Image (cartoon, grey):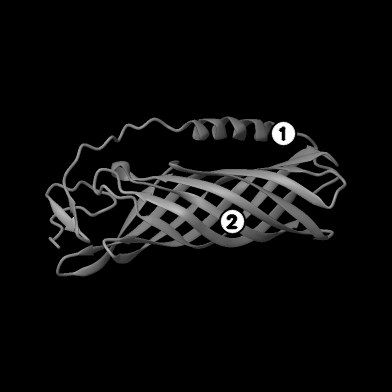
């Protein structure tokens, strides 16, 4: 395995040929001008609509809510862009917190706009070796929830990362495993559906499925699915 002269595997400008876990990495032409995906554009429009809905009086249901959740990230794909011609699989546990300011129509639907914080200590395999890829994200979260007088309350949730930090571990010849930290803004989003059930007047348990996608430097992308369970306190 050759030494890294400049840069690092997942981000930065690699200026000389290197080898990482048996894979030859050559300097490529990186497409750094990829267009913002359609889901990101749609999410921005949804956030504007949510802000308008929040102006509707919220009497009859919770004005604010706070929650915590945990789950498993699976079927992940770490696209290393032009650096390596393989797409390692990623998986791991993750956990997070969220909160919303709510508005809507009592006994019909509720829309909440707020924030989230999430950490995903993931792993990926490359060249027969296992590496860590820890992702920490915080940003804007929106939830739309049915509030009909029924036991189960289905909802849809989406979010845009204000900031995402991705700490990727890789191997350097003669040194061993090292970690490089990347930070990106407004280049990650998630979409999902779920359902909640009220167990006490102000406490609701929920489960959800989310699809997430992140973009990093040099064409590196990370996407996958996650299932979460959690609890939410409504006031």
Query: Looking at the picture, how far across and down is residue 199, in whole percent?
Result: 81, 62
Q: Determine the residue positioned at 16% across, 44% down.
A: 27
Which class describes the residues within 10 Å of circle 1: few (<14), some (14-19), or many (20+)? some
Q: Secondary structure at mark 1?
A: helix
In percent of the image, x 45 and y 41: which residue is there? 186
- The reply to whether residue 43 is visible in this rendering is yes
Q: In the figure, is residue 97 to the left or right of 149?
A: left
Quarter of the image where the N terminus is located? bottom left
Q: Which label sits on residue 53?
A: 1
x and y percentages locating residue 46 in the rendered image: 61, 33
Indicate which disc residue 132 carries. none
On-image quarter of the C terminus: bottom right
Distance in Å between CA atoms under marks 1 and 2: 28 Å
Q: Would you identify the image quadrant in which residue 204 lies? A: bottom right
Residue where numbered disc 2 is placed: 227
Q: Nearer the viewer, mark 1 or mark 2?
A: 2
Secondary structure beneath dot 2 equals: strand
Residue 121 image position (x, y, % from top left): 45, 63
Q: Is residue 59 above or below residue 7?
A: above
For the residue pair 163 and 151, the one nearer the viewer reads as: 151
Of mark 1 and mark 2, the one earlier in the sequence is: 1
Name the residue rendered at 50%, 47% in the picture. 212
Describe residue 85's horizontal placement relative to residue 100 as left or right. left
| Occupied quadrant, residue 51 | top right
Mark 1 near mark 2, Cβ–Cβ under 8 Å?
Answer: no
Q: Quadrant of residue 181?
A: bottom left
Q: Percent position (x, y) of residue 112?
A: 69, 43
- Residues packed near mark 2 inside 10 Å, few (<14), some (14 to 19) or many (20 plus): many
Left or right? Give the position of 120 relative to 231: left
């Amino acid at each position: 395995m050759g030494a890294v002269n400049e840069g690092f595997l997942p981000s930065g400008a690699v200026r000389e040929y290197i080898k990482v876990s048996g894979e030859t990495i050559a300097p490529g032409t990186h497409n750094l001008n990829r267009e913002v995906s359609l889901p990101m554009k749609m999410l921005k429009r949804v956030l504007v609509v949510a802000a308008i809905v929040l102006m509707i009086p919220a009497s009859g249901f919770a004005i604010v809510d706070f929650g915590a959740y945990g789950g498993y990230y699976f079927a992940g794909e770490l696209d290393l862009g032009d650096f390596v011609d393989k797409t390692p699989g990623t998986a791991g546990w993750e956990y997070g917190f969220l909160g919303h300011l709510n508005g809507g129509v009592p006994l019909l639907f509720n829309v909440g706009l707020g924030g989230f914080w999430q950490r995903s200590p993931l792993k990926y395999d490359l060249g027969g070796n296992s590496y860590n890829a820890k992702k920490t994200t915080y940003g804007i979260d929106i939830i739309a929830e049915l509030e009909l007088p029924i036991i189960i309350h289905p909802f849809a949730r989406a979010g845009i990362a204000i900031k995402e930090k991705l700490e990727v571990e890789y191997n350097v010849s003669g040194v061993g495993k090292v970690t490089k930290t990347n930070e990106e803004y407004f280049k990650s989003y998630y979409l999902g559906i779920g359902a909640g059930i009220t167990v006490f007047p102000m406490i609701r348990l929920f489960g959800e499925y989310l699809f997430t996608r992140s973009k990093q430097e040099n064409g590196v992308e990370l996407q996958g699915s996650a299932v979460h369970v959690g609890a939410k306190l409504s006031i």
